[in-house]
Image (cartoon, rainbow, N blue to C red):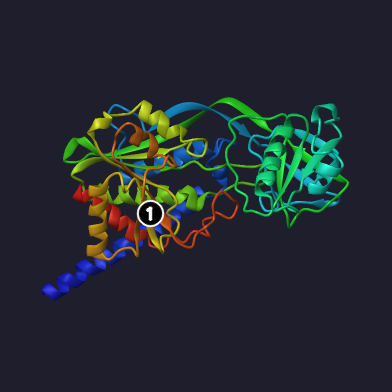
Amino acid sequence: MLKHLFLSILLVNLFSGFAQRDYALSIVDSLCSPRYHGRGYVNEGDLKAAGFLVDEMKRLGVEAFPEQSYTQDYALSVNTFPHPISVALGGDTLEPGADYLVSPISGTAQGEFEVIELNSRSYFNTFNGNINFSKLDPSQTVFAFNFLDTLDKRFRQKMESLSYEVTRYFPSIYVTNEKQMYSVGRKQTNYPRISIDSAAYKTVDKAYISVTNKYIPSYYSRNVIGYIPGNKKKKYVVFTAHYDHLGRMGADTYFPGANDNASGVAMLLALAKYFKENPPKYSLVFCFFSGEEAGLLGSKYFVEHPYFQLKRVKMVINVDIMGGAGDGITVVNATKHKKQFDKMLKINDDWKLLPEIKKRGASANSDHHFFSEMGVPAFFIYSMGSVKNYHDIYDTAENTPLTNFDEVHDLLRRFVHKL
């Protein structure tokens, strides 16, 4: 009888574990779909994703925080590209996202331009290392910065900076052989800057550029906040994850953001699902922040306008990049909060969950930062493994297996119970 009972409990636990990952995969798949436009600021992708999160929390039975709503609005400035974009070198049209990226602070340029290529030879021999860009005709010229012919890193960095500065007067092209990563722009220049992968670049006389930006000085985004009351209602454990991503770069190209950070959002929702069925000792707050990619703006606003006294927070657990923990996880602020980190290590050792939990010191690299600045104990946890897609068009649901998702979930829920 006891043997059968043990087996039943084991099977229930195994099924529950697999169900968490299956549930999380469905969340990642939904958030990365085109209808959310990369969860950025074109077509209100962030607001549509926020609506999805509110509906999902209601479905799970997660409450709004007492005397508050599920959403917290705030304003930010942002530069966007809602219109079709096109770049062609000679007669070859390049593929956006794969062959090139438009700088997120780019302005507008339309038409065919004469290409003036700058490399180590032409920069010194033709221009004597000094170009007066302001005296040239911006309606006819694009400068192509192609300094892959030099190994001088400082000089290349100087030319990279110049490729941004020149956009006051001209469109510019920057040729690179390094991984390109998109971001969110908070300001705009006069003309676009286009970084082109060296494999797609060729020397030509003419380039066709069609880039139109839309700068929004006051865009209203929103945080999404859920609540599960615990036995100690006025003491809180706060889970955070940013749900925003990079949005669209033109009408046809968007950045799905599966690993960064639909995976972290899925972890929070899976934890909310578990704790709704297994009430915690402390009340749990689930904060889904927007504006992280624009400079941690959503978390900053929340810390400045909290729903509760921050001194009542036992711990903040911020999760990001949960796409594959095959090699384990890294914990930022582990050296700052040694007692809590040692507790997490012991849980992992006792239950043999992850290959490694790596400790790291303080860093202002995610939404835990402003909590830490206010003296609130906070961990930032991200996965280590084979999933390397980041700020590119390849960060898709299909490329995000959520390896060891159940094990990380198990670790975090046990950690909360031990606080």
137 left or right, relative to 54: right
Residue drawn at x 44%, y 33% is: 298
Q: Position of residue 210 (x, y in %)?
A: 77, 39
Residue drawn at x 80%, y 31% is: 133
69 left or right, relative to 11: right
Q: Position of residue 165 (x, y in %)?
A: 70, 33
Secondary structure category for the residue under label 1: strand
78 left or right, relative to 350: right
Residue lying farthest top?
Answer: 218
Q: Position of residue 409 (x, y in %)?
A: 32, 56
Please state which of residues 176 and 211 is positioned toward the viewer in this rendering. 176
Above or below, 105 relative to 120: above
Query: Tag count in the figure?
Result: 1
Q: Position of residue 144 (x, y in %)?
A: 78, 44
Q: Is residue 84 visible?
A: no
Above or below, 124 relative to 311: below
Please state which of residues 250 and 3 is positioned toward the viewer in this rendering. 250
Q: Residue 323 lies in what quarter of the image?
A: bottom left
Count neighbours of disc 1 (C-alpha within 10 A) and say few if under 14, some if 14 to 19, many if 20 or more. Answer: some
Q: In the rendered image, which quarter contains the N terminus?
A: bottom left
Q: Which residue is mark 1?
A: 330
Residue type for callout 1: Thr
Q: Is residue 338 visible?
A: yes
Residue drawn at x 58%, y 41% is: 183
Q: Residue 191 lies in what quarter of the image?
A: top right
Residue drawn at x 87%, y 34% is: 140
